Image (cartoon, grey):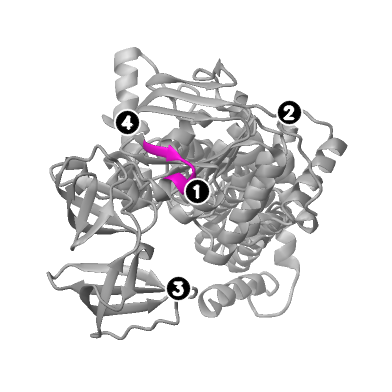
Amino acid sequence: MISQQPTQTRPGTVVEFTGVVKEFAGMRALNGFDLTLRAGEFVALLGPSGSGKTTALRVLAGLESTDAGTITIDGVDVSDLSTSKRDMGMVFQSYSLFPHLSAGENVEFGLRMRKIKPAERRRRAAAALAMVGLEDHFDRFAHQLSGGQQQRVALARALVTEPRVLLLDEPLSALDAKVRVQLRDEIRRIQTELGITTLFVTHDQDEALAVADRVAVMRAGNIEQVGTPEELYSRPATPFIADFVGLSNRISGIVRNAQVDVYGTLLPVIDPATPDGPAHVSIRPEDIEFAEAGLAATVIASSFLGSLRRTTVRLADGSTVFLQHGVRVHPVTGESVFLKFSGAPVSTEPVSSTSGVLKPA
Amino acid sequence: MLLFLAVPTLIAIGTGFFDKSGAPTLATVAALGDPVVLTTFFNSFWLSALTAVVGAVVGAIVCYALLGTRPDGPLRTTIDSLSGVLAQFGGVMLAFAFVATIGIQGMVTLYLRDTFGINIFENGVWLYSTPGLILPYIYFQVPLMIITFMPALQALKPQWAEANATLGGSTASYWLRIAFPVLAPSFIGSLLLLFANAFSSYATAAALVSQGSQIVPLQIRAALTSETLLGRENLAGALALGMILVMAVVMVAYSALQSRAARWQR
């Protein structure tokens, strides 16, 4: 079922946002938004709600107009082109299948709009449904399909017309956890097979990191950082990214000569330009370990997470940190333990910096 | 249900088949074939059909216009509550309102006559005959359509229009291929309700029409209370039976349509 390819997407579609501004009743949803999607690339727009990620996708689709800036597809400005002429496939957050049409007729809809002959339409719709593993569901109506199946049909409907760009507006957020992971991986597989340039909006960092070639983290209408999942995780540009992508402890430290003193342990500072003085340090929970001796702490909670365990401890000064470790170690609440820092902080921000105190919404 | 709906219906059907001494007879049912009775049914039918269609179309357009307003805004809530009241406004009050405004001595009639020299009753006093019922009926049909059809229109998902656009569809393809087919069952259902509402309406007509019995409910009144022709109570039963038959036919036609249209519904 996987080998059937109904579409041969034209390779080489490049999408470019340049200085895009969009306001809603005086509020700037996009504030000079810049982003380039390379040909065939899968880019995730990640951010808290209200950060402008859905607006960015909707202006690309033409469902919202722009107030300033340009959007080009393969170098051609599409800012004034209507949605129906932009040649994009879109999957929506809420179930959007036409309820009076069968799954097959839903998939055929875009082909019908392009005046494709009935026999050809049916053949291509069947192939698209086979691509998402629903070849036996051609005649089912939306209410006869599960949420995951409906989103698969929506994906087939979006792809059957061989669009230049695939837009995914939180397509998994209404699904339960297991289906979400399955469909997420399947979207990535199909996207890779077709080589279609894809913009994927999500507020779920696991989703973004798992499927995207690059992740653009948005905040207040602009991109805070764009990079591969690995780059974002290991070298977050700001404390906001360190906090939003992955988990991290915010600990006080003192920077001195490109090193930071955290409770007596000297750790390297990623940005050598960081000025000396007090700083907020972000340390990943997997970079803190239990030790025979070192920083004294008391266990206050420990939770089993399947493949690992997360334990929260209180330090002598009253602050709390959490660490991740193997499930064989089983700390007991109230137990006295020692900690050591085993990895470099992912971010070190001088205390005076205002951005250091901002938290995601 | 049984006591208040089924039993009266069965009694109404039953009375059509018995004479006043209680002996079974088909004579009263045969009276349904009387030309006067047939004309009455015809009047009732076209009056109901016309006001249902006009009410449904106008009501649907008003609903569509209301979609552009904020759901909790003053305009929407005012029209919502006003519709709720006006849909139940039929009866003596409504009849009086029309008599007072466009009756022979009505405010509007006199104003038009004195100011513009327009006589709205130039070709006869139509307000007190069957055509005169059209306007008052529409007056309660439109609000009824608004309260029954608004939820269906509100249930149209904006994503359907957006999906249509991203798939290369136009505004016309959205309405023709998505919105109209999705709304059709609700629209037909509302239309039927409006038809039944008009067909069974009595009080407005009773208050407005004083000469003759042009529609079936007035004919039933005449059969029950006539002082010149006594003992025609069973004809009333037969007329009621006729009304039930008409409604049954409409219901069957509706459910046949519905089962075709609604195979995609839960």
Residue at 46 percent of width and 25 percent of height: A17
- Which label belongs to residue A114? 2
User: Which x, y percent locates residue B242?
Assistant: 66, 60
Whichever of labels 2 and 3 marks the residue nearer the N terminus, that label is 2
Where A3 sits versus A328, above or below? above
Say which of marks 1 and 2 sits in front. 1
Q: CA distance from mark 1 to mark 2?
A: 27 Å
Camera-side mark, 1 or 3: 3
Identity of the residue drawn at 52% across and 51% down: A94
Number of other residues with Cα within 10 Å of mark 1, as a class: few under 14, some 14 to 19, many 20 or more: some
Identify the subunit bearing mark 1: A
Cα separation between marks 4 and 1: 66 Å
Residue bearing mark 4: B105
> Looking at the rendering, which quadrant does residue A334 occupy?
bottom left
User: Chain under label 2?
Assistant: A
**Discs 1 and 3 lie in a common subunit:** yes
Q: CA distance from mark 2 to mark 3?
A: 52 Å
Three-letter residue code for mark 2 = Arg
Circle 1 residue: A170
Q: In percent of the image, x 37 and y 21: which residue is there?
A: A67
